[in-house]
Structures are given as structure tokens and as C-alpha cells.
Amino acid sequence: MISVENIEKSFGERRILDGLSLDFAEGEVTAIVGSSGAGKSTLLRCIDFLERPDAGRVTIGDLTVDAASASRQEILQLRRRTAMVFQHFALFSRKTALQNVAEGLRVVRGRDRVEADREAREQLDRVGLSEHLDKYPAQLSGGQQQRVGIARALAMRPEVLLLDEPTSALDPELVGEVLATIRGIAEAGQTMVIVSHEMDFVRQVSNRVVFLDQGRVLDDASPEVFFGPDVQSRTRAFLREYHAARGRPEYQI
Ligand SMILES: Nc1ncnc2c1ncn2[C@@H]1O[C@H](COP(=O)(O)OP(=O)(O)O)[C@@H](O)[C@H]1O
Ligand SMILES: [Mg+2]
């Protein structure tokens, strides 16, 4: 079980997360949706203390870390149970695909070079990049770079994989290959929390949709309900705006 309890986070005077609590079941894909500025990235970053919450607790398995008392050691332990896939990939430009994935295995997991390379190859194979092991990020398409980012995260064997708009920096024709990769990982039973604006994908892949607005959970439903006719009015307004912005009148919500 993964949970956040009463997470509060402000930047200056602005309260971004306002006592937010959520549980994430093992093996499930939870999608976090909401308008820009709703606090989605801040929530993901609070789960692994990339942003330290002002208050609240994060639990992953048998480890609970309280913002009020978290030690460096506890935060490191928390990070070892999570991995993040970033919007802008965050690869080392002077390392090859293989080296980008193997680096964490050596530095964080203490593997020797041979073992780290073996595991890195395995993960890159999983995301369909066996042919590109020795290429540098600049020699790869955006979609391939993001798949390296996903392989790097998977190599850490996280209890929960956090993905922050993993396709939003990609050209439209490259989105599909990355979503297909994420779908495959979800089907393999990886627990995931994913922030995404790809509503078709969210609808198909997630077990649950959490709608965040101004740092609060406004809706928390199965995709069938969330995208169905009985969804609550704020969610309906959000979805209508979303589809209108994309010129998708076929979605009559
Ligand atoms: N490090 C930061 N310093 C100051 N303000 C921030 C910081 N990170 C995020 N914010 C602000 O917090 C709000 C929520 O941001 P974010 O969590 O990135 O939203 P989302 O991912 O939903 O678009 C935004 O108004 C953003 O400008
Ligand atoms: Mg964001």
C-alpha cells in the first residue's frame, strides 16, 4: 500500500496542496488529471520528497515518512522505493542510452559494471530499444529518449513508478509509441501514479482517475464513472473544456 496523508505544501503565501490524502493500491494505475497549476506535479514530487511537504506523511509499504520529522536517511529510503519519469526526460546528454540506465544501477543500487549493463540492456529491451543501446540522447527521437527515461526508472524496480506528463514534450506522432510502452508496463502489474492529459489513454489504462483542482481532490472515480454520464458537474465542466480545446466535438459530455 502506498498512501499520502494530509499533505500540505505552500510556495510562499500560496497553498498548493491543502491537506491532501490518497491511497494507491498495489498493481493499480492511478491517473491524476486537472488543469495546469492544479498541483499535480507538486503532489508527485511530494510522494518522493523531491519537494518536501510542509506537513503530512507518505507511506510506501512498511516505510512511513513524516514531513515533520523526516531524516535524510528516511528520505533516501523513500526514494529507493520510487522512480520518476519526467516530462523532459532528464537524460545525461554525454552518456549513451545504456550508460543512462546503468548509471543508477551502479550508483544507487551498487551493482558492478557487468551486472549494471546486463540489467540496463534488459530494461532497454523491454521498452523496445535493443538496437539503440550505444546512441546518445541527441541521436534518438524524443519518443526514444523518453523510453530510455522509462527504462532507467524501471531499472530501479520501484514499488511505485511516478510519471509526470511523460508525453507532453513529444511531437504528436511520437506520443503513441511512449503510451504503448507505458501500457505494457501497466499490464505487467507495475504500480503507477501518472499525471497525464491524454484522456483516451487515461480512460483505457488507468484503474482510477483522481481529479485535482487547487490542491484538493475534486473527484476520485473509476474511469468508467469518471468518463461516464453520471460524473459530477465540476468534472464534466473540466472534460468539456478539455475536449473543446482539442476540437473533439464527438465527445458529448
Ligand atoms: N518550486 C516552486 N516554487 C514556486 N512555485 C511553484 C513551484 N513549483 C510549483 N509552483 C506553483 O505551484 C502551482 C502548482 O504547480 P504544479 O504542481 O506544477 O501544477 P501542475 O503540475 O498541476 O500544472 C503553480 O501555480 C506553480 O506555479
Ligand atoms: Mg505539472
Image (cartoon, rainbow, N blue to C red):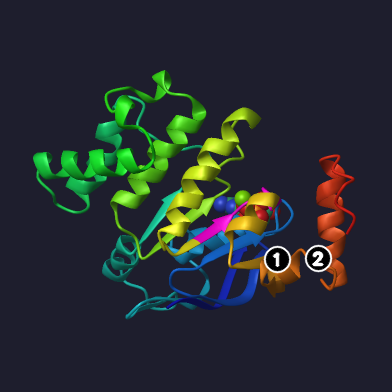
Residue 96: x and y in percent read 29, 27
Residue 15: x and y in percent read 67, 66
What amino acid is at disc 2?
Thr
Q: Secondary structure at mark 1?
A: strand
Q: Which residues are magenta?
A: 193-199
- Residue 69 lies in the magenta stretch: no
Q: Residues within 10 Å of mark 1 (few under 14, many from 20)?
A: many
Q: Which residue is mark 2?
A: 235
Pointers 1 and 2 in contact (C-beta within 8 Å) = yes
Q: Nearer the viewer, residue 28 or 116?
A: 28
Judge whether 120 appears above or below 187 on screen.
above
Residue 211: mark in rendering:
1
Counting the numbered discs, the total is: 2
Residue 86 visible in the snapshot: no
What amino acid is at disc 1?
Phe
Q: Nearer the viewer, residue 40 or 2?
A: 2
Q: Secondary structure at mark 2?
A: helix
Mark 1 and mark 2 lie on one chain; the one further toward the N terminus is 1
